[in-house]
Image (tube, rainbow, N blue to C red):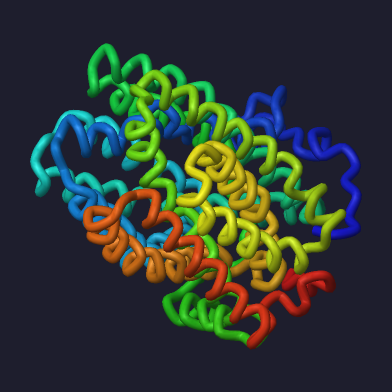
Amino acid sequence: MRGTRTTGVARAFRIGDGDGGGSGQGSVVLRYYCYMATSTLGFLIPVWVVLLDEARGFSYTQIQLLDGAFFATLLLAELPTGYVGDRLGRRNALVLSSVGVGLAAAVFGLVESFPAFFAVYVLWGVAQTFRTGNDSAWLYDTLAGYGEVGTFTRVRGRGLAVLLGTNAATAVAGGYLYGLDPRYPFLATGLVNLAGVPVLLSLPESPVADGDRFTLGDARRALSGLLAPGLRWFVAYAALFYSLGWAADVFIQPIGLAAGLDAVDLGYLYALLIGASAVASTYADAVARRVGVGRLLRLSPLLLGAALLALPLLPVAAVGVFLLQRVVLNATAPVAETYLNDRVASLGRATVVSGFSMALSAVSIPVKLASGPLADATSPTLTVAAFGGALLVGCALLVVVVRPMADADSPTPAD
């Protein structure tokens, strides 16, 4: 948030015996960072498309169908799992997510048929929805409970940086593990995510007023806030931005393989990309303060869209383009989350954030389904360029016509 100075966040988060199972030695924020580290997918990030494409022989159409199934699962499961987080506790929902993601990642490296992968993608999607919405809502309300809500962007950004830094380190290891046995990166990812369960159980549940009386009617009323004049166009804008921006990710590995890289090289490439992401996330709050929330969220899609569109003209600049992609998306994510959280109430927050994630999934599904056949018919590079053109034109039109984030630099917190 703008204009808010924290004083002794770590000291403010000291917890005593019996409060969330703590030892009295650590802090909630530091344990949150530990949880983020255990959420890593770094071991498998540089090789999952390689496994599907080369080891399993799937076409881009099949790979994107699997991705489409994943996002369709997110779309259907976001609201129920967000409601579970508001009703039964966000920390408990995060525990379920770590268990589900851990199991899905481990099984991913073992199955071989398309139907088996489809089932794994569905399981992974359900598990992921217990994380989206609940993690952001848990942190925001926990900070608010200590009177430190103004630190959300900074703590969230640093938490994402911890996750990305862990991803970067494990990506290098993942390339080597894949060379030893294609199953190893996926088994390692599963074990690390399962290790996050005891970390989560050591955290306190976030304070939510009347959470035990949160009903389906409350969830519906909370969700309707996304249609309020100050949010509905922001949701549409963010859904277009992030669905198209992240859609290019699936083609990084094919483009790298076509350039002569192997699994180990891809590990180092992803370590570079994720390391840049970690730096961007760390300084997201500082950038937003200097540039302005509204200006940052309006200009970022235009910059990224232009870079992706130019990729076929400058193929030697592919690494630079994908570095820019990671920096832009990760520098804006905590800022966009703050913008949303500032405008919704505590009760029902996880449901609302899950609804926001659901909108992103809804836009991602047609993008995934269309891009697979396009890549098979043309090339991954031209498909990435198509993402850039759609991003540039779509976000520019929304900025000019409906002016999303018009009040971005004068937030009105809901709590």
Relative image position of residue 98 (x, y in whole percent)? 40, 39
Q: Is residue 75 visible?
A: no
**Horizontal and vertical percent position of residue 10:** 79, 34
Using the image as rendered, state which of residue 206 and residue 191 is in the foreground: 191
Measuring 63% from the left and 64% from the top, which residue is drawn there? Answer: 302
- In the image: residue 302, left or right of residue 199: right
Question: Which residue is located at x 31 percent, y 51 percent?
Answer: 379
On screen, residue 125 above or below 199: below
| Relative side of 161 to 196, left or right | right
Q: Quadrant of residue 84?
A: bottom left
Q: Position of residue 337 (x, y in %)?
A: 63, 59
In this view, 88 is above or below 415? above
Count of marks placed on residues = 0
Outermost residue on the front side: it is 313
Q: In which quadrant of the rendered image does the N terminus lie? A: bottom right
Image quarter of the C terminus: bottom right
- In this rendered view, identify the residue nearer to me: 143 or 237: 237
Side (left or right) of 115 relative to 267: left
Q: Nearer the viewer, residue 167 or 375?
A: 375
Residue located at (39% from left, 49% from top): 381
Residue shown at the point (52%, 54%) measured from the top left: 308
Residue 245 in picture, x, y percent from top left: 50, 57
Q: Is residue 245 left or right of residue 414?
A: left
Q: Would residue 318 be visible to someone looking at this image?
A: yes
Of 230 and 65, the residue lying toward us: 65
